[in-house]
């Protein structure tokens, strides 16, 4: 009886560690997916506010901060910042809407400032918003190619 109790006592930490080892990767992947979904939802809010502003003013805003307070409240603006998956710090979205006119609904108007947007398989990708408020994930190579077509800054 003592031997059985001793074996159970000694095996319990090993079993707990094994269970943690088996379930931790799933938890990490689920957390990364949730963070990715949250960032996509945040960018959708920004893209929608940009679209409404552009319709009302007949031009896009010069910066995202011009959306406050009429198109997005100060609290909503803060809550809609990009949240880095590694540092958990908020950052401004990259904004490309200061074009003279949005030439098409597929123009990229905003993007994540980081290429690490989720789990390992999502490295070198960006979350982007288009002028039609569509939010999607594209590779860094496609992102750069589209910005070159749009003649954006360093990508001309």
Image (cartoon, grey):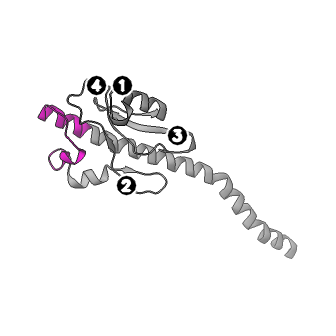
Question: Depth check: 50 or 79 in front?
Answer: 50
Q: CA distance from mark 4 to mark 2?
A: 28 Å
Position of 19 with respect to 103 (left or right) is right
Q: CA distance from mark 3 to mark 4?
A: 25 Å
Q: Position of residue 111 (x, y in %)?
A: 37, 39
Q: CA distance from mark 1 to mark 3?
A: 24 Å
- Say whether marks 1 and 3 touch (CB < 8 Å): no
Quadrant hosting residue 5: bottom right
Q: Mark 4 sits on what residue?
A: 105
Q: Position of residue 154 (x, y in %)?
A: 37, 36
Residue at x 17%, y 37% (from the top left corner)? 53
The circle drawn on residue 149 is 1
Q: Position of residue 114 (x, y in %)?
A: 44, 45
Instruction: Tell me where the magenta segment starts and ends, as one range.
Output: 48-71
Farthest residue in the left direction? 57
Report if residue 53 lies within the magenta region: yes
Residue at x 42%, y 43% (from the top left corner)? 37
The circle drawn on residue 122 is 3
Of label 4 and label 1, which has the lower sequence position? 4
Of label 3 and label 2, which has the lower sequence position? 2
Q: Mark 2 sits on what residue?
A: 90
Q: Residues within 10 Å of mark 3 (few under 14, many from 20)?
A: some
Of label 1 and label 3, which has the lower sequence position? 3
Give the SS element for disc 2.
Answer: strand
Of label 4 and label 2, which has the lower sequence position? 2
Residue at x 62%, y 54% (from the top left corner)? 24
Give the SS element for disc 3.
Answer: helix
């Amino acid at each position: 009886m003592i031997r059985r109790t001793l074996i159970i006592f000694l095996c319990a930490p090993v079993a707990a560690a094994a269970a943690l080892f088996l379930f931790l990767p799933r938890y990490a992947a689920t957390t990364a997916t949730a963070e990715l979904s949250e960032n996509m939802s945040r960018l959708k809010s920004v893209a929608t506010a940009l679209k409404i502003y552009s319709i009302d003013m007949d031009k896009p805003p010069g910066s995202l901060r011009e959306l406050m307070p009429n198109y997005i409240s100060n609290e909503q603006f803060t809550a809609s910042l990009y949240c880095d998956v590694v540092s958990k710090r908020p950052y401004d979205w990259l904004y490309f809407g200061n074009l003279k006119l949005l030439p098409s609904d597929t123009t990229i108007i905003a993007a994540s400032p980081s290429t690490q947007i989720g789990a390992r398989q999502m490295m070198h990708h960006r979350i982007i918003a288009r002028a039609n408020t569509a939010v999607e994930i594209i590779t860094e190579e496609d992102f750069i190619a589209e910005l070159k077509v749009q003649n954006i800054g360093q990508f001309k």
